[in-house]
Image (spheres, helix red, strand yellow):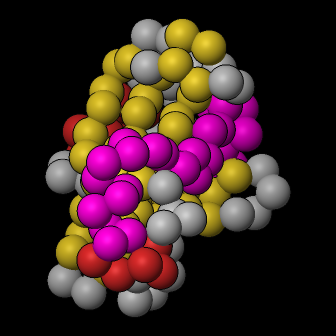
């Protein structure tokens, strides 16, 4: 994985997740955990309003939007939340009080891994 801000990093965990953009909008995303930070990428949002054509263009282009890239030192709170009946929601609050909600497959796996870095 290569991003402009971080350069090449060792990926400890990569998972396809659901990003809760709002209470009613869930987007497919990829959550990465490296040795120094967490990153969340979604499909490019610029073509979102084009309906079927926009969906097709997003798949063809493969473009990604970086939702966040947080150093561990910038993560203020990390805890388990819920979304309806779903209990595997990881809520991440950064040092600027922005909260990101991500539906993961197994919250306890993420909690154990993040605990090794003092975040859980």
Q: Is residue 14 left or right of residue 47?
A: left
Residue at the (26%, 40%) spot, across then down:
15
Q: Is residue 71 highlighted in magenta?
A: yes
Name the quarter where the N terminus is drawn: top left
Residue 66 spot, x, y in % from top left: 57, 46
In percent of width and height, residue 53 lies at 32, 72
Residue 46: which quarter of the image?
Answer: bottom right
Instruction: Between residue 53 and residue 111, name the one nearer to us.
Output: 53
- Compared to residue 70, the image places residue 81 above or below, namely below
- In the picture as drawn, the residue positioned furthest to the right comes out as 96
> Is 86 situated left or right of 63 in this image?
left
Residue beneath the point at 52% across and 19% down:
2
Depicted 70 relative to depicted 53: above or below: above
Q: Nearer the viewer, residue 5 or 88?
A: 5
Q: Where is residue 100, by image quadrant?
A: bottom right
Residue 103 appears in the figure: no
Residue 31 position, x and y percent, is 39, 42
Residue 102 appears in the rendering = yes
Does the segment drawn in magenta span residue 54?
A: yes
Q: Quadrant of residue 116?
A: top left
How many marks overall? 0
Give the percent coordinates (x, y) of residue 78: 52, 52
Please give the name of the residue rendered at 54% of the width and 10% of the height, measured from the top-left corner: 8
Q: Nearer the viewer, residue 66 or 100?
A: 66
Q: Quick check: 48 left or right of 71?
A: left
Above or below, 87 against 109 in this view is: below
Q: What is the span of residues highlighted in magenta in the rendered image?
A: 53-82
Q: Residue drawn at (48%, 67%), measured in percent from left and top?
A: 47
């Amino acid at each position: 994985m290569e991003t402009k801000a971080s350069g090449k990093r060792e990926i400890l965990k990569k998972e396809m997740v659901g990003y809760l953009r709002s209470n009613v909008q869930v987007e497919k995303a990829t959550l990465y955990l490296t040795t120094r930070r967490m990153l969340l990428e979604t499909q490019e949002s610029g073509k979102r309003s084009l309906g079927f054509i926009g969906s097709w263009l997003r798949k063809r282009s493969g473009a990604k939007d970086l939702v966040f890239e947080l150093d561990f030192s910038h993560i203020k709170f990390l805890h388990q939340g819920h979304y309806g009946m779903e209990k595997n929601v990881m809520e991440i609050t950064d040092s600027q009080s922005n909260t990101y909600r991500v539906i993961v497959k197994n919250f306890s796996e993420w909690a154990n891994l993040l605990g090794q870095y003092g975040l859980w």
